[in-house]
Image (spheres, rainbow, N blue to C red):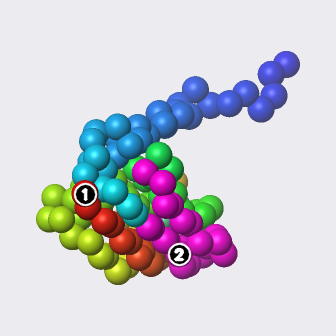
Amino acid sequence: MRVNQPKESVKKRPPRKNLVALDGTLDAVSRMHLSIWEKGKEASPFEVRMVHRDAVREHVDRSNPFCYNGGICLGDLLREMVCGRQEEFIGTSFCTGQEGDPEDLGPHPSCATRFEINATLRFR
Ligand SMILES: [Zn+2]
């Protein structure tokens, strides 16, 4: 007897590629300091800090357990900063996810998680 067989339809999302660490975006950056605070449902109480280019992540995930496809794309922010040779960014990014399994019926309110970002780049 088979019990608790996982549904065939459950798809595992492929891991996101950490493009920003590979695509040369940060080649012109000599020093950086990123600090990110998550605010919202079950938000992490810890500051995410990145001061080494190797530690930079393309994507910052959220902690809200009801959120699907959420998080923010840090890579895009950094690409924009580097493109405009912008040295400072202080701002808020909202999670792009929605609450509730997208395959379920019912309302899927936007996730209210937000990320307060403070980024400093120094260019060569
Ligand atoms: Zn979210």
Name the residue carrying label 1: 124
Give 100 or 111, whichever is nearer the viewer. Answer: 111
* Magenta-colored stretch includes residue 83: no
Position of 8 compared to 85: left or right?
Answer: right
Position of 110 compared to 37: left or right?
Answer: left
Residue at left 49%, top 71%?
36
Residue at left 60%, top 64%?
63
> Counting other residues with Cα less than 10 Å from the Cα at mark 1, is it few (<14), some (14-19), or many (20 or more)?
few
- The mark lying in front, picked from 1 and 2, is 1
Give 118 or 30, whichever is nearer the viewer. Answer: 30
Position of 72 compared to 82: left or right?
Answer: right
Amino acid type at circle 2 is: Trp
Give the residues in magenta: 33-53
The Cα–Cα distance between marks 1 and 2, rounded to whole angstroms, is 27 Å
Which part of the image, by quadrant, shows the N terminus? top right
Give 88 or 29, whichever is nearer the viewer. Answer: 29
Determine whether the beta carbon of the residue marked 2 sits less than 8 angstroms from the nearest atom of ligand 1.
Answer: no
Choose the circle earlier in sequence order: 1 or 2.
2
Residue 93 picture location, percent across and down: 37, 73
Res. 62 visible in picture: yes
Give 111 or 116, whichever is nearer the viewer. Answer: 116
* Res. 86 image quadrant: bottom left
Residue at left 26%, top 61%?
123
- CB contact under 8 Å: marks 1 and 2: no
Residue 47 picture location, percent across and down: 59, 72
Name the residue carrying label 2: 37
Residue 11 picture location, percent across and down: 52, 33
Q: Secondary structure at mark 1?
A: loop
Residue at left 54%, top 73%?
38
Vertically, is 88 above or below 11? below
